[in-house]
Image: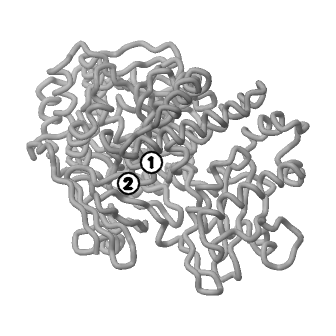
Amino acid sequence: MDESHAPLLVELDRASNLNDLLARRVAGTPGSVLAERGHPDWQPVTARAFADEVLAVARGLVALGVGPGDRVGLMSRTRYEWTLLDFAAWAAGAVPVPLYETSAAEQVAWIVGDAEVGLMVVETPQHAATVERVRDRTPSLRTVLVLDEGAVATLVAAGADVPDEEMARRASLATLDDTATIIYTSGTTGRPKGVPLTHGNFAELSANAVEQLGVVISAPGARTLLFMPLAHVFARFIEVLCVASGAVLGHTADTTDLLRDLGAFHPTFVLAVPRVFEKVYNSSEQKAAAAGRAAIFHRAADTAVAWSRALDTPGGPGLVLRLQHRVLDALVLSKIRRALGGRAQWAISGGAPLGERLGHFYRGCGLTVLEGYGLTETTAPATVNRPERAKIGTVGPAMPGTSLRIAADGEIQVRGVGVFPRYHRNEAATAEAFDDGWFRTGDLGALDEDGYLRITGRKKEIIVTAGGKNVAPTVLEDRLRAHPLISQVVVVGDQRPYIGALVTLDAEGLPGWLATHGRPAMTPAEAATDPEVVAALDAAVAAANEEVSRAESIRRYRVLATDLTIAGGHLTPKLSIRRAEVLKDFAADVDALYDGTPGTSAP
């Protein structure tokens, strides 16, 4: 059994909590900018001003009956007010409970009821209406406030007479061992499980991340634009991390024109899932093709990848490669950097494998993508690549204060400061999740000689073909999903004679691809039978198959008539596939891959 351990770099007083983290920021640099609000016309908010606003809102929570340890629900898109309310809840001694703004009434009823939420802040009247439909099943819920109807002002006004002494008492109640938040896993199957994360999970992991990743997150002028949902643990951790590191934090929920927002905010580091990096690449490729510059773009991309790979060799890039890179950087690669705001040198990617070629491409463009790995139960990062030594294709070594081990069956197990203590009101799930103090992640991986982790699949998603071959579907899915024509991929084949795949077309990327390939405009359904589209999909499948053995390769695929979406119940809010739901709803399409129905055979 392989193991790796990274020692803790920073130890915190066990009597401290997340309020002390903000207090240290204010004491150290009260006039520094902590956040910029008012997208797209960014207005600076100093650390002192933010802390004062947090206190005013926290007074309101106390005045409206929120007691120590009480749950406060937050249901909203990513915006400045979410971070404000998070810290206000902690200042009031309360426990914020995030809900995705896309949550259905049944999900709201379950989370609010299970967490016993007493006060809830939602973003819109529509969200309030969703909550109202299940009020009869949420007896703990007393108050619902709406951000778009002045919730913050209402709280500030309500708390005007709450004394300073009470607020000081509230802020000091929690210790590192106390619950800071309960995050409900979006879950690809079954009801979401409540994951209580402690003040220590966030504070200790943040303090050590600052020490380990300082060149990225606490360098002079460090700033990032948060656009991932704050209901997800990754964004919540980054929210706390930016307060701890001294970085400037911006928020936007409008991802329809993300490049515009990045260009306006000018982040120095970017945090995203691989799909964002794939779309930036695909969009740049299509723009180059539309301008008749496809050949030079591909030459620049190849040079960027070669340059990055050469950086990992003892001699580094040779003279010819250096000259080629300098020329193509001026012509093409610098435009990629400008598309991400012009100042970004670093990116942190998680949620799924980025792919080695894409990782090398971005490093060759001057943006080093540090892949990491974690779950809700590990407070996001259990591992992350180091700025001084990034190994592309891995998710890095353990975070400080974290231990990794690979079980006999290949499962990744984690122990350390970021690991949650238990599931909320679910002893059976807690007992199943731990092995002698080690958290069972359910993911499969391997450690190299330096302790860097490589993810190889998901334990519960392993496909066993009729011939007994074990196949990890994510390798093929991640590779295929990077293609500009493809939105989602679900690899199938459990107890079947060979591996197949269900594919959906990307409605956003399709028009650009058609235009650059001289094809007329068409709907995704029409494109599914277009000879050139089919040829491109064939080539993409063939390329993905090169990553696996013949027995693991996709033999046939089928293009679905509709995309897989969160609203349709086929994706989680973090865009993971709900595999069971897909297999149930598209059972006829899966059968068609094996019953002789005419379709597409992979080359």
- For disc 1, the neighbor class at 10 Å (few under 14, some 14 to 19, many from 20) is many
Q: Position of residue 140 (x, y in %)?
A: 38, 50
Where residue 507 appears, as percent x and y from the top left, is 75, 42
In what quadrant of the picture does the N terminus appear? bottom left
254 on left or right of 231: right
Q: Residue at x 62, y 50 (%)?
A: 566
Q: Name the mark on residue 374.
A: 2
- Residue contact at pointers 1 and 2, CB within 8 angstroms: yes
Q: Is residue 43 above or below residue 279?
A: above
| 529 with respect to 241 (left or right) | right
Residue at 63% from the left image edge and 31% from the top image edge: 256
For label 1, the residue is 350
Mark 2 neighbour class, 10 Å CA radius: few under 14, some 14 to 19, many 20 or more: many
**Quarter of the image where one finds residue 334:** top right
Quarter-of-image position of residue 300 = top right
Q: At numbered mark 2, what does the secondary structure look like: helix, strand or loop?
A: strand
Q: Amino acid at mark 2?
A: Gly
Asked whether residue 185 is in view, the answer is yes
Which mark is first along the chain, 2 or 1? 1
The residue under the point 41% across, 61% down is 193
